Image (cartoon, rainbow, N blue to C red):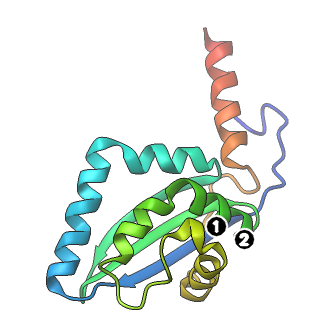
Amino acid sequence: MAAAAGVEGRTQLLPFLVILPARGRVAFAEMQLILRTMAMTGKVDRDMTSVGTPHFAQFVPLEDQQLGFFTVYDGAFDKYIMDFTRNIGEVFDVIFKFTKDPPPSPCRKHVQEFIDFAAGSSRAPIGFYQAYPGLSNQDIKALIADSGTKAA
């Protein structure tokens, strides 16, 4: 679709991969219950959509009472984390209550500490496949919207 429309992407897509250890078995269960409840209400989806740059985001329960947060986003790390903090920081404020060695909360009042925590906690992937190299989330949405208009 992008090639047919003559769209050439220039946006850098980056992974943000964080593993948060729970304070214990009960805390781990509470984290999952809270996130499942937020997912059912659509809160996390609405908050992530308002950030505007993530291509996807997911929380994943892992072994040893750890919670993974994995996302791919467009653009600069600091800007993403600042937008992220403004739009979905509340979710992390709740999760951090159950996490070992969290940054100060609320995230909105401790933006630099959250940026530092995120930068220090993010892990590098072994490989990183991109189906739409250089195309931002917004580019892809615009292409889909345009194709829907043309099909009508």
Residue type at numbered disc 1: Ile
Q: Position of residue 31 (x, y in %)?
A: 26, 70
118 or 53, nearer to the observer: 118
Q: Quadrant of residue 78?
A: bottom right
Answer with left or right where residue 37 lies relative to residue 45: left
Q: Which residue is drawn at 25% across and 61% down?
A: 34
Q: Which residue is drawn at 75% across and 61% down?
A: 75
The mark found on residue 81 in the picture is 1
Quadrant in which the C terminus appears: top right
Q: Quadrant of residue 117?
A: bottom right
110 or 147, nearer to the observer: 110
Q: Regarding mark 1 in the picture, which secondary structure is present there? A: helix
Q: Where is residue 21 in the image (x, y as percent from the top left)?
A: 34, 87
Q: Residue at x 24, y 52 (%)?
A: 37
Position of 23 relative to 147 (above/below): below
Verify CB contact (< 8 Å) between mark 2 and mark 1.
yes
Answer with left or right where residue 55 lies relative to residue 5: left
Q: Which residue is drawn at 48% across and 75% down?
A: 105
Q: Which residue lies under the disc numbered 2?
A: 78
Q: Which residue lies furthest to the front in this view?
A: 109
